[in-house]
Amino acid sequence: MSENQIRFDDGAGYERMMGVWSRLAGEVFLDWVAPPAGLHWVDIGCGNGAFTELLVDRCAPAEVQGIDPSEAQLSFARTRHTAGIARFQQGDAMALPFADGSFDAAVMALVIFFVPDPAKGVAEMKRVVKPGGTIAAYAWDILEEGGFPMGPMQAELRAMGRKPMLPPSAEVSRMEALREVWVGAGLADVETREITVARTFADFEDFWASVRIAMSMAQAVKEMSPSELEGFKARVHARLPADASGRITFTSRANAVKGRVPGH
């Protein structure tokens, strides 16, 4: 994964890697946001539709518009979505293809650190949401230990003196940075919280299969010889203690933020 060019074009692979984590954190996030039913939502950076489906299942929306730059991811999202409420289209988080005040709520699920200019992305969310509407997001605490599902690989790359995998706006994942962006956008009633979730894998090979899509994009991994890669894999394995049956359980932590568009 080059630091500034992370792009997911495999919806099924992304589902195994991050879709499961996304829903685990997303359930806690939506309980915290506690939206009423019947809202019109825009899900920005919807990817393969994992969080979109969560919105449909848990929040009884009147409408969900999913926006993502990857047509391959959107195709997967359309295939998985059977309720008929959500619509998916290609688009840019910093130039949303919607009129002012089109929605009751805008959300970014594990996305804001991929937006080249997070403040501009949040300004666009605010623009397309009606006064009184909700602007919310959650993001892995990607720069802190225990904050990212890919953390064991990051830690081992650093130990090897190699550049870890980071999105272009990693700094915005910090709690105070999220708060500053929301306050800076002129949003009211800004609140933040941590979300910690755990995931269990049958064994290390199950875990490794779940991160293979990210490993295939990591520039540092591409530069490894086969023997170096095997050594890297073994050392990552050593960082993930298993129980007596070989299962691996570890936690990741996300930072969440929400605010309200003033004027209502």
Image (spheres, rainbow, N blue to C red):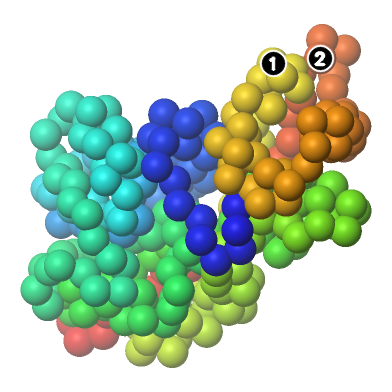
* Left or right: 144 in relation to 127: right
At 68% from the left and 26% from the top, the residue drawn is 207
Can residue 115 be seen here? The reply is yes
Q: Place residue 199 in its image quadrant.
A: top right
| Label 1, label 2: how far apart the Cα atoms are | 7 Å
Mark 2 — residue?
A: 246
Q: Secondary structure at mark 2?
A: loop
First in sequence, mark 1 or 2: give its number.
Answer: 1
At 84% from the left and 47% from the top, the residue drawn is 156
* Left or right: 210 in relation to 99: right
* Left or right: 24 in relation to 240: left
Which residue occupies the foreground of this view, 160 or 175? 160
Percent from the top left, x then y, of residue 59?
27, 44
Percent from the top left, x then y, of residue 213?
56, 36
Q: Secondary structure at mark 1?
A: loop
Task: From this view, report whether residue 206 is shown above or below residue 71.
Answer: above
Which residue occupies the foreground of this view, 96 or 135? 96
Residue 202 has which mark?
1
* Left or right: 117 in relation to 55: right
Asked whether disc 1 touches disc 2, contact meaning CB atoms under 8 Å apart, the reply is yes
Q: Place residue 197 in its image quadrant.
A: top right
